[in-house]
Amino acid sequence: FTLAFQYTTSANVLSFTALSLIWTSILSRFVLGETLPQRTIIANVLALMGSVIVVVGISQDGDETETELFESILGTVIAFFTGVGSAVRVVTLRSAALWAPGTPMLMGMLLGQVLTALLGLCLYPD
């Protein structure tokens, strides 16, 4: 999450990480078999459209060099995968509660956070 701020605007980062709720609902539909109400589907489509408007509006500045454009795209991709990773984490925890009730998830969550922090440190630019 923080790494994305190094490369792109805060609007891009926050709009893409906020989409984690959309990815959670989509993953829950396919992984957990949950049904999505029509209002959730409509909200998902509107949120995706809003994020596209933010990204297209920012990318049409015209004053960016190729390096700045590449960094902006890289930051947006990092922010996108931050949102998807958050959704995967939530769906994984919910699926463990459904399929293996009583499974202690605290150590798994702790290990995931530590590994994520180590990966972030490795990717952090000097």
Image: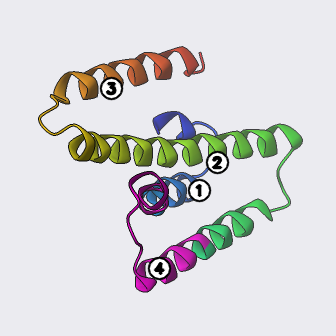
Labelled pair 2, 1 in contact (Cβ < 8 Å): yes
Tell me which segment is drawn in magenta: 23-48
Name the residue that disc number 2 marks.
76
Type of amino acid at the residue the image marks with label 3: Gln
Q: In this view, does 103 lie to the left or right of 88?
A: left
Above or below: residue 104 compared with residue 37? above
Q: Return the disc, 4 or 2, that comes first in the chain's sequence.
A: 4
Q: Is residue 58 left or right of residue 90?
A: right
Name the residue that disc number 4 marks.
43
From mark 2 to mark 1, how far is it between C-alphas?
6 Å
Please state the horizontal and vertical placement of residue 65, each as a whole percent of the image: 86, 44
Name the residue that disc number 1 marks.
12
Please state the horizontal and vertical placement of residue 125, each as a whole percent of the image: 60, 20
From mark 1 to mark 3, how far is it between C-alphas?
23 Å
Above or below: residue 47 compared with residue 114? below
- Assign the C terminus to one quadrant of the image: top right
Q: Return the disc, 1 or 3, that comes first in the chain's sequence.
A: 1
Give the crowd class for mark 3: few <14, some 14-19, many >=20 residues within 10 Å.
few
- At 16% from the left and 40% from the top, the residue drawn is 101
Give the crowd class for mark 2: few <14, some 14-19, many >=20 residues within 10 Å.
many
Name the residue that disc number 3 marks.
113
From mark 4 to mark 1, how far is it between C-alphas?
19 Å
Type of amino acid at the residue the image marks with label 1: Asn
